[in-house]
Amino acid sequence: MSIIKRTFEDHYEGLVRFANRYLNDMAQAEDVVQEAFIACWKEKDELKTEEQTRAFLYTAIKNRALNVIKHEKVKSNYQQTVISESNNEDLLFETGVITEEVSTLFQKALAELPDQQKSVLTFAMNGYKNSEIGEELGISVNTVKFHKTNAYEAIRKWAKYFFVIFILLFIRGLR
């Protein structure tokens, strides 16, 4: 009987338990031990004694078990990265949808304003001060304030739609 066959018959179960100490997975431990025996068989001409064979097997099992652990960590990290990227992509998508919907509603609200209010609000959104808006449009500062107030009031009526979209998306996010 060959040294490898005898070692297999006498030590297989103990070697599997040894591998399982690293892996905590009996099926993986058995796979690792079988791979180690295959590697041992390839080196059979170099392994002259049972002690050399067992030493080779313990080392091969330890190295293969550690490789399995490293591989599992890489897989886990990759899965976490994919999940994180997927979540980021979902967030970017949802943010884009919200932004586009709010922008569309705001543009509709702006389009319904009288021309003077629309002009005043457009300048205000671009950072102009009331006095600068008055100069650009050739109206008094009080007239600018009047048009701004009326424009904001009209926009507030549209804001209820923004709120509904926000609530719907918030509820969807809770699922």
Image (cartoon, rainbow, N blue to C red):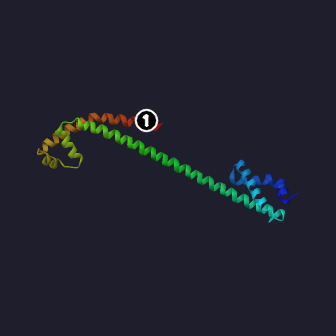
- The residue lying at 45 percent from left, 43 percent from top is 90
Q: Judge by depth and name the residue closer to the eye, 154 or 28.
A: 28
Q: Secondary structure at mark 1?
A: helix
| Left/right of residue 128 with respect to residue 170 in the rendered view | left
Residue 65 location (% of width, % of height): 69, 56
- The residue lying at 72 percent from left, 51 percent from top is 31
Mark 1 highlights which residue?
171
Taking the view exactly as shown, the residue that stands out farthest to the right is: 1
| Left/right of residue 80 with respect to residue 120 in the rendered view | right
Relative height, residue 38 to residue 105 (above, below): below
Q: Judge by depth and name the residue closer to the eye, 156 or 71.
A: 71
- The residue lying at 19 percent from left, 37 percent from top is 150
| Left/right of residue 163 with respect to residue 87 in the rendered view | left
Question: What is the crowding at mark 1: few (fewer than 14 residues within 10 Å), some, or many (at least 20)?
Answer: few
Residue 105 location (% of width, % of height): 30, 37
Residue 46 location (% of width, % of height): 80, 66
Residue 85 location (% of width, % of height): 48, 49
Image quadrant occupied by the N terminus: bottom right
Q: Amino acid at mark 1?
A: Ile
Relative height, residue 71 to residue 168 (above, below): below
Which corner quadrant of the image does residue 48 belong to? bottom right
Which corner quadrant of the image does residue 59 belong to? bottom right
